[in-house]
């Protein structure tokens, strides 16, 4: 992969909109920026400031949540993740790999739980450089990392569990992935770079036939490459990229003309945009506009994280 691709596609998640959880992201080191989108961590809010208690309760009510649970929406973004879930009280940990998914889902957290998630979000195609297996094998599911990863990661998980600082957890994982990349480097793929570049530049609106013709390959070869590197078909991935492009426009704020937005992103009309958007967001573009007003800092909107999470 090429780190310059990151400037063309920065997928968004609705992390940080839940007032009862904390969320933070950090960029990888320069050596890994072609493959890793960011490191991230989420967990229960450390404390509630008395003056904000009423506002927090109103936010919870607006999400139709009970006092016993909180919810976060997870969106398709073409990425895959290593997830390290850990409970600092019980010392329980679970390490898994989440493949590419094409439908939104809801992550529900029970009130009072201390479980946090520290994760690596791989840029589309980036994880293949590390595990070397066809990425479609993991699409739409979670797998125990010990079963699929080329080197044992249990020791790294234990080290991450022991440290108290998010930046230190990032340093440990970044160092591990840098060494793994040197030992298990998968051959680079200029064709995959070109394909991703064309999809990103077009905002996901380039047709698959044209994409194959531009690179002088068959559509069958195109599908095989995407199965190997991305985990989903080029058509589905392009749809995810187009959805993310719409989401980016909404996230930028300002008044929205839905008909103009639809035409700008290659939809037939507003109804077509709304149907397609609901498939990936689980709700309407109008709901997305409201939710994005509550977001915390993202790796793609701030250069550095603004807070440090403690275990």
Image (spheres, rainbow, N blue to C red):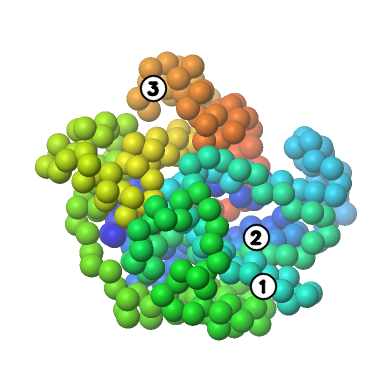
Residue 154 image-quadrant placement: bottom right
- Between the C-alphas of marks 3 and 2, the distance is 35 Å
The local crowd at label 1, few if under 14, some if 14 to 19, many if 20 or more residues have their Cα within 10 Å, is: some
> What SS does tag 3 mark?
loop
> What SS does tag 2 mark?
strand
The residue positioned 85% from the left and 49% from the top of the image is 68
- Between the C-alphas of marks 3 and 1, the distance is 44 Å
**Of callouts 3 and 1, the N-terminal one:** 1
Residue 92 image offset from top left, x and y in percent:
71, 74
Which of the numbered marks, if any, corresponds to residue 42? 2
Whether residue 272 sits left or right of residue 224 in the image: it is: right
**Of callouts 1 and 2, the N-terminal one:** 2
The local crowd at label 3, few if under 14, some if 14 to 19, many if 20 or more residues have their Cα within 10 Å, is: some
Check the image and name the residue furthest to the left: 216
Which of the numbered marks, if any, corresponds to residue 93? 1
Tell me whether the residue at label 1 lies in contact with that at label 2, contact meaning CB atoms closer than 8 angstroms: no
- Between the C-alphas of marks 1 and 2, the distance is 15 Å
Residue 233 image-quadrant placement: top left
Q: Nearer the viewer, residue 3 or 87?
A: 87
The residue positioned 45% from the left and 35% from the top of the image is 243
Quick check: can you spot residue 92? yes
Tell me whether the residue at label 3 lies in contact with that at label 1, contact meaning CB atoms closer than 8 angstroms: no
Compared to 129, does 124 lie above or below?
A: above
Whether residue 243 sits left or right of residue 104 in the image: it is: left
Whether residue 112 sits left or right of residue 91 in the image: it is: right
Q: Nearer the viewer, residue 47 or 265?
A: 265
Q: Which residue is mark 3?
A: 267
The residue positioned 78% from the left and 75% from the top of the image is 90
Compared to 2, does 240 lie above or below?
A: above
Tell me whether the residue at label 3 lies in contact with that at label 2, contact meaning CB atoms closer than 8 angstroms: no
Foreground disc of the pair 3, 1: 1
């Amino acid at each position: 992969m090429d780190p310059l691709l990151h400037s063309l596609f920065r997928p968004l998640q609705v992390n940080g909109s839940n007032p009862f959880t904390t969320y933070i992201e950090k960029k990888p080191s320069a050596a890994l920026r072609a493959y890793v989108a960011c490191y991230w961590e989420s967990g229960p809010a450390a404390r509630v400031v008395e003056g904000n208690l009423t506002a927090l309760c109103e936010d919870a009510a607006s999400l139709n949540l009970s006092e016993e649970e909180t919810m976060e929406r997870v969106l398709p973004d073409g990425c895959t993740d290593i997830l390290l879930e850990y409970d600092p009280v019980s010392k329980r940990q679970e390490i898994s790999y989440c493949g590419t998914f094409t439908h939104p889902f809801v992550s529900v957290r029970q009130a009072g739980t201390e479980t946090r998630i520290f994760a690596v979000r791989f840029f589309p195609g980036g994880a293949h450089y590390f595990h070397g297996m066809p990425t479609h094998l993991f699409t739409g599911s979670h797998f125990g990392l010990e079963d699929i990863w080329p080197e044992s990661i249990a020791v790294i998980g234990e080290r991450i569990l022991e440290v108290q600082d998010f930046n230190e957890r990032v340093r440990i994982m970044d160092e591990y992935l840098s060494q793994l990349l040197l030992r298990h480097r998968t051959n680079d793929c200029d064709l995959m770079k070109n394909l991703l570049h064309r999809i990103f530049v077009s905002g996901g609106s380039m047709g698959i036939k044209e994409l194959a013709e531009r690179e002088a390959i068959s559509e069958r070869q195109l599908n095989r490459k995407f199965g190997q590197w991305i985990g989903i078909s080029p058509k589905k991935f392009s749809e995810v990229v187009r959805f993310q492009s719409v989401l980016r426009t909404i996230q930028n704020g300002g008044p929205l003309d839905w008909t103009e937005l639809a035409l700008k992103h290659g939809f037939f009309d507003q109804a077509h945009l709304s149907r397609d958007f609901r498939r990936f967001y689980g709700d309407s573009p109008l709901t997305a506009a409201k939710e994005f007003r509550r977001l915390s800092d993202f790796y793609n909107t701030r250069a550095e994280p603004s807070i440090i999470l403690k275990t």
